[in-house]
Amino acid sequence: MGTPVPPIDESLLRGFAFTCRPECGLCCYATPAVDVDERRRLLTLDAATPFETEDGAWDQIGARPDGGACHFLTDAKCRAYGLRPFPCRTYPIHVHVGTRPQATLVLACPGLSLAPLDAWSARPAAGPPRGLEVELAAARTEYLSVPVNSWIDEGRRSERMLLKRLARRGGAIEPELVRDSLRNSPLAIDLEGGVRLPPPGPETPISELPLFEDERLGIVVLRGNEEDEYELLKVRETGGAPESLGQFPAIEPVPSLDPAALRRLTGYLAYLLDRDAFLWSTYQELRTGAPEPLAAGLASLRDATANEVVVRASVRARLRGGDGIRLTVEDLDRGIRAMDGDLLDRPTMGRVL
Ligand code: SF4
Ligand code: SF4
């Protein structure tokens, strides 16, 4: 008998409520992975289905150009709904397998209420998730069909190697200790300081940027222009050059958050630190970037994310006619949604189910 498969850690789903808004379609601007059977069934439905292989790991339904939607999305409806592959069945749940299997939520999805983040710093037992039963069942079923134990062994090896390398530079600390110390450490919201990320350059492909849904404009993305301002672009379902919807210069003065918005941001950052995918993307940055101890790397990624959320919240508030300077919790939620897809899309050393 083989080693038993560890259950998925589902604690990051606790307290969240989900109701899909099918007219949104955000999750279909994607290239979902397919297994052999799903691929065969989709080809039976449509022999012209394009497939791509990334890193030799999975086949994916090929993307339309310039960040367009999945091949099967037509007039905001899935032509393959009954045959849609597992990532579509589990969304907005995302399962990351690093040193353990962990489920988290893609908070870019407008069908999720973000209110449970408020208490996240204290990590309450907020009760089971609501409205995610079907997606969770699909994730659990799929999980049992992949070689989980070998993925976990690989994850543990990678983590050990990286921590050893960091220790040689004097920076290794146990990941859980680092997370715990950061959960309550002061946050640097400093848009003029070093932690602010510049907007992604105009040459960045749309498919590498976090898309989000705007209630009035549809699926959009923010990218930097030649002047280092943010430019809002509307993405087309069928692909092709996106339409520019306006430019947003740097924010002066630095936006302030009302107490409810600050509580939401603090909770979001605590949630972020609890995500294994976030820890592993820090590893990735430490592996390829300047030498930095784990604690400093995680703190700077957390603070850069905080600043990016605030910048995006401000742009979205201005888009709605506000001044973008005093941000409410609703503004902050829009900033989180405009950012969160990116954090789960980053290259990571763990495997994504
Ligand atoms: S992104 Fe969320 S709300 Fe929008 S269609 Fe997908 S699951 Fe539904
Ligand atoms: S297969 Fe259907 S549900 Fe999945 S991404 Fe494509 S259009 Fe959306």
Image (cartoon, rainbow, N blue to C red):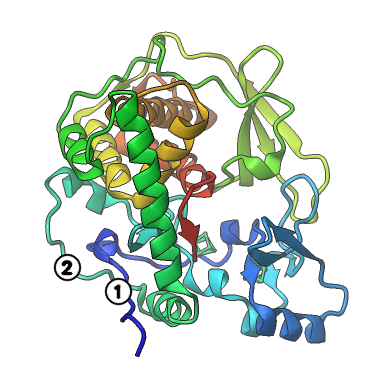
| The one of 75 and 351 positioned closer to us in this rendering | 351
Q: Using the image, tell me which numbered label, if any, was put on residue 161.
A: none
**Left or right relative to 3: residue 178:** left
Q: What residue type is labelled 2?
A: Gly
What distance separates the C-alpha of mark 1 from that of mark 2?
22 Å
| The one of 132 and 344 positioned closer to us in this rendering | 344
| Residue that appears at 47% across and 30% down | 312
| Residue that appears at 40% across and 15% down | 191
Residue 349 lies, with reference to residue 244, above or below; the image says below
| The one of 239 and 162 positioned closer to us in this rendering | 162
Q: What residue type is labelled 1?
A: Pro
Q: Using the image, tell me which numbered label, if any, was put on residue 6.
A: 1
**Which label sits in the foreground, 1 or 2?**
1
Residue 174 lies, with reference to residue 141, above or below; the image says above
Residue 314 lies, with reference to residue 93, above or below; the image says above
Percent position of residue 223, x then y: 63, 29
Element at label 1: loop
- Residue 280, quarter of picture: top left
**Left or right relative to 267: residue 135:** right
| Residue that appears at 45% across and 54% down | 350
Other-residue count near label 1 (Cα within 10 Å), few / some / many at <14 / 14–19 / ≥20: few
Q: Using the image, tell me which numbered label, if any, was put on residue 127.
A: 2
